Image: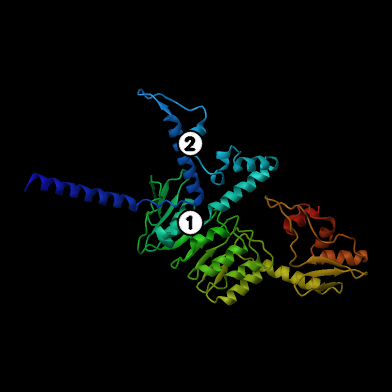
């Protein structure tokens, strides 16, 4: 075999090896998705580099020294007036003008900074289509959850995957109760789609998961357990989204989610496979009634953490209150005390008593309920106030905390 032939074969072999290495290295890389803003910045940067090169090549010595022209526009390519940008005409950039206009509207207060961080957090929870395309629904959801402090468990795997405070991935084996730290950035999760890898359980308790973030948890066909205990942003909208997209869910933990109401629980009625629902630490009105309706709708469901004795006491108190001739009830279940002039005073029901709150969930308007003194005898006023648990007097004087009627407010008004 001639040397020329061997050289050509060696060249072909080396090219094939380079192509294989390039292809295998690309497997673990994400494709860079460029938006039009990034393309525009790249174009402006290229023009800037080209303009600098033209100016430096205006007068250049063999030693490498150069002189730039006194008028840079003399060496730059000419443009028609219709194609000239604001930079070409010497005008100020539009971004600078916009920022200058907004300077007087800047608010550096703590409330505005907190609001800005919440908005950034909302943007951080949005779904990335490229992640779903390259990883699949289950693995994409695992990356999304583990990165935000949650832990996941895959089907036929006893390990829980999460990260610690330093961002290091931790694999917790529930069988041997051992912890192994993995010093990698991808949380010991594959960087590409793996066939047969399905999420079976999710523990997102204490995380800042909200309604918008549930878009990343679609098409989890094998998900059986979901823990959302003590999540500050889980509300009725979140429950409606869960009820419409997690049909195979068997265990749901909503303990400590104080934004949930009794009406929001009915959004779970589509989960026909649900077996256990934990509602500990939730003080929503008519929670026991909603839990009973939910158990009647889903025969296999068992609701845990609801104080049915307390709910029965509240129901009996409402029944005694309605027996008073001066108390009437509307079609929505709201109760009013009617005075001698025919005016109605709200004393119980489904009216939201804190309609306006700030970023800290503190009320700006304490109550929108009428506060005039009802035209009735003192004996009748005291009787209705006692039957309502002191709520009539509470609504007249205003709540000390502005919050709706609860045991803490009742203790304040009795002082």
Bin the neighbour count of mark 1 within 10 Å (Cα to Cα): few under 14, some 14-19, many 20 and up. Answer: few
Q: Are marks 1 and 2 in contact (CB under 8 Å)?
A: no
Q: Is residue 19 left or right of residue 309?
A: left
Element at label 2: loop
Residue 336 seen in the figure = yes
Instruction: Give the residue at x 77% y 57%.
Output: 410
Sequence-earlier tag: 1 or 2: 2
Q: Nearer the viewer, mark 1 or mark 2?
A: 2
Residue 304 seen in the figure = no
Coordinates of residue 132 in the picture (x, y in percent): 44, 59
- The image quadrant that residue 335 belongs to is bottom right
Instruction: Give the residue at x 33% y 51%.
Output: 26
Closest to the observer, 357 or 306? 357
Residue marked by disc 1 = 128
Residue marked by disc 2 = 76
Figure colour scheme = rainbow
Closest to the observer, 210 or 386? 210
Quick one: which residue is furthest to the left in this view? 1
Q: Is residue 286 left or right of residue 327?
A: left
Coordinates of residue 138 in the picture (x, y in percent): 43, 61
Q: Is residue 383 left or right of residue 264?
A: right
Element at label 1: loop
Instruction: Give the residue at x 55% y 39%.
Output: 88
Mark count: 2
Bin the neighbour count of mark 2 within 10 Å (Cα to Cα): few under 14, some 14-19, many 20 and up. Answer: some
Closest to the observer, 2 or 135? 2
Q: Is residue 271 above or below residue 14?
A: below
Per the model, the C-alpha gap separating discs 1 and 2 is 41 Å
């Amino acid at each position: 075999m001639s040397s020329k032939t061997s050289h050509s074969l060696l060249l072909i072999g080396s090219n094939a090896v380079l192509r294989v290495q390039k292809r295998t290295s690309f497997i673990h890389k994400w494709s860079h998705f460029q938006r039009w803003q990034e393309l525009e910045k790249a174009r402006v940067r290229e023009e800037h580099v080209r303009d600098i090169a033209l100016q430096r090549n205006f007068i250049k010595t063999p030693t490498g020294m150069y002189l730039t022209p006194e008028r840079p526009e003399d060496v730059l390519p000419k443009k028609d007036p219709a194609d000239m940008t604001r930079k070409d005409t010497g005008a100020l950039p539009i971004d600078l003008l916009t920022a200058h206009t907004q300077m007087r509207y800047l608010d550096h207060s703590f409330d505005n900074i907190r609001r800005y961080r919440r908005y950034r957090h909302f943007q951080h929870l949005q779904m990335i289509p490229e992640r779903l395309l390259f990883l699949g629904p289950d693995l994409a959801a695992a990356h999304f959850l583990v990165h935000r402090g949650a832990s996941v468990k895959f089907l036929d795997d006893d390990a829980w995957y999460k990260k610690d405070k330093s961002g290091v991935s931790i694999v917790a084996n529930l069988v041997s109760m051992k912890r192994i730290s993995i010093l990698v950035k991808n949380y010991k999760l594959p960087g590409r789609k793996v066939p047969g890898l399905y999420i079976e359980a999710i523990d997102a308790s204490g995380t800042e998961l909200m309604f918008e973030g549930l878009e990343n948890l679609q098409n989890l066909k094998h998900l059986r357990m979901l823990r959302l205990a003590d999540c500050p942003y889980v509300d009725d909208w979140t429950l409606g989204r869960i009820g419409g997209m997690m049909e195979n869910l068997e265990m749901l933990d909503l303990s400590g989610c104080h934004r949930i109401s009794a009406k929001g629980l009915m959004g779970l009625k589509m989960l026909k496979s649900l077996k256990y629902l934990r509602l500990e630490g939730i003080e929503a009105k008519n929670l026991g009634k909603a839990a009973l309706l939910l158990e009647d709708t889903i025969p296999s469901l068992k609701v845990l953490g609801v104080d049915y004795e307390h709910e029965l006491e509240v129901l009996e108190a409402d029944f005694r209150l309605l027996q008073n001739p001066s108390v009437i009830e509307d079609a929505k279940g709201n109760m009013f005390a009617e005075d001698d002039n025919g005016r109605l005073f709200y004393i119980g029901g489904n009216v939201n008593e804190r309609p306006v709150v700030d970023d800290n969930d503190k009320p700006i308007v304490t109550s929108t309920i009428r506060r005039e003194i009802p035209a009735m005898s003192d004996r009748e006023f005291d009787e209705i106030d006692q039957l309502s648990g002191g709520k009539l007097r509470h609504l007249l004087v205003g709540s000390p905390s502005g919050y709706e009627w609860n045991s803490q407010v009742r203790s304040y008004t009795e002082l």
